[in-house]
Image (tube, rainbow, N blue to C red):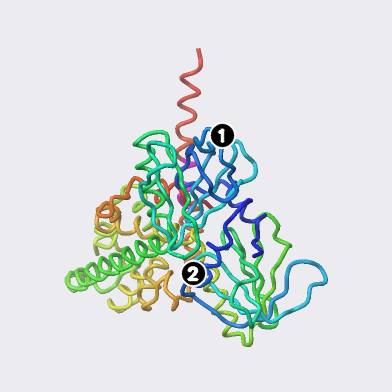
Amino acid sequence: MRYNEKELQALSRQPAEMAAELGMRGPKKGSVVKRRLVKLVVNFLFYFRTDEAEPIGALLLEHCRVIHEEPSGFSISFLEDPERKYHFECCSEEQCQEWMAALRRASYEFMRRSLIFYRNEIQKMTGKDPLEQFGISEEARFQLSCLKA
Amino acid sequence: MKLNERSVAHYALSDSPADHTGFLRTWGGAGTPPTPSGAGRRCWFVLKGNLLFSFESREGRAPLSLVVLEGCTVELAEAPVPEEFAFAIRFDAPGVRPHLLAADGPAAQEAWVKALSRASFGYMRLVVRELESQLREAHHSLDLHRRSSWKAVSSRCKPQAPDRWSPGLENGHSLSRDCSPIGLVEEGGSRPAGRGLAEWELQGPANLLLGRGQSPVSPETSCFSTLHEWYGREIMELRRAWLQRAQENQPECKDQDRP
């Protein structure tokens, strides 16, 4: 799959929701923990060598699962291969919880569900569709049918 | 730069809703070789969230390319060949070439430009925040209304939290009916009116979150598990209601088919 690295690099320079130096271990067997600068920008998690300006890699955070890993870390895995985990180590349980919460709401799909939820609530309470003012009430992405268990 | 390509491709092919799809001609975008006639290569494009994927065909099992629609603008463009219905995705970042695409007709062109312009995470976040504040306002004004009308009724009440949602979902008239004091059942033992009302307020994570001054999309939120749990419940209820209705409809169809 082709993608433009420059576009991703530019994205990694945009303001981050969260950024910190964490211990990171890749999913391959035998991989070791390395210090990385980890940066959450929209639905991408970028990771950098601590002294470099360009990221080594990025993780798209759609359809991912964030799990707490003892002692004060978490792992990210993806729907198609839940056993393949990217491990992260935080400096405290508090930092760990903060990251987990941020990562869980970092996906576009989460935003979409929130939007549909609010739209539905407002419609029930006021009888009006709040998306009409935006002219986007008919868009496929915002329909209640998008919600799946 | 590494990317979790397998997961990205999986997401592209998953049945999470596509926000827009269609055939587009593409020139010189990442990895598309120019055709001899300069007419552009025709690919099947899928927009999911802020990600634009291209496939060789509608049945393609692996995306050819990915464009992340952040920090870009979409505008009508002059095609290299006098091509109609072309548009370009231009990035603000220096050194990043624009992606040139062309639709099959004016309607498709307009639809794509609109869809792509609204695809960014930032746009979605804006709309969500706007709705959050609208919901907060709606709750607030409803709350004021209830507090003033509450004084007129009996102080003992039982909040019917589980039942509240089904009528709400089915007929769309929830709050005005369910929250009227008439709908409440008296319970033995005294319960202060104020607390009863507060329990009514806790109907869903939105209330919980808004009540604590938090929101699902702002950094202060710590109630995802609540929100997640509630979604699960509502979805199960919806599903149950649909299945029930489907079952009710089925026997009728079967009867009609019988000779």
Q: Type of residue at label 2?
A: Thr
Of all chains, the one bearing label 2 is: B
The crowding category of the residue bearing disc 1, from other C-alpha atoms within 10 Å (few below 14, some 14 to 19, many at least 20), is few
Of all chains, the one bearing label 1 is: B
Q: Type of residue at label 1?
A: Pro
Residue B145 located left or right of residue A94: left
Q: Which residues are magenta?
A: B237-244
For marks 2 and 1, give the one nearer the viewer: 1
Decide which of B154, B49 is in the foreground and name it.
B49
- Mainly helix, strand or loop, the magenta region? helix
Residue B105 located left or right of residue B222: left
Question: x, y (%) of residue B245?
Answer: 44, 39
- Residue that sits furthest to the right in the current view: A30
Question: x, y (%) of residue B230?
Answer: 47, 63
The crowding category of the residue bearing disc 2, from other C-alpha atoms within 10 Å (few below 14, some 14 to 19, many at least 20), is some
Do tag 2 and tag 1 residues touch (Cβ < 8 Å)? no
Q: Please report the residue visible at 34 percent of the width from the left and 53 percent of the height from the top.
A: B168
Q: Secondary structure at mark 1?
A: loop
Residue B183 located left or right of residue B25: left
Report how far apart the C-alphas of labels 2 and 1 lie in the structure. Answer: 57 Å
Corner quadrant of residue A79: bottom right
Question: x, y (%) of residue B108?
Answer: 38, 38
Q: Which residue is mark 1?
A: B36
Q: Please report the residue visible at 46 percent of the width from the left and 74 percent of the height from the top.
A: A15
Q: Which residue is mark 2?
A: B226
Q: Earlier in the sequence, mark 2 or mark 1?
A: 1
Q: Are marks 2 and 1 on the same chain?
A: yes
Question: x, y (%) of residue B186?
Answer: 31, 67
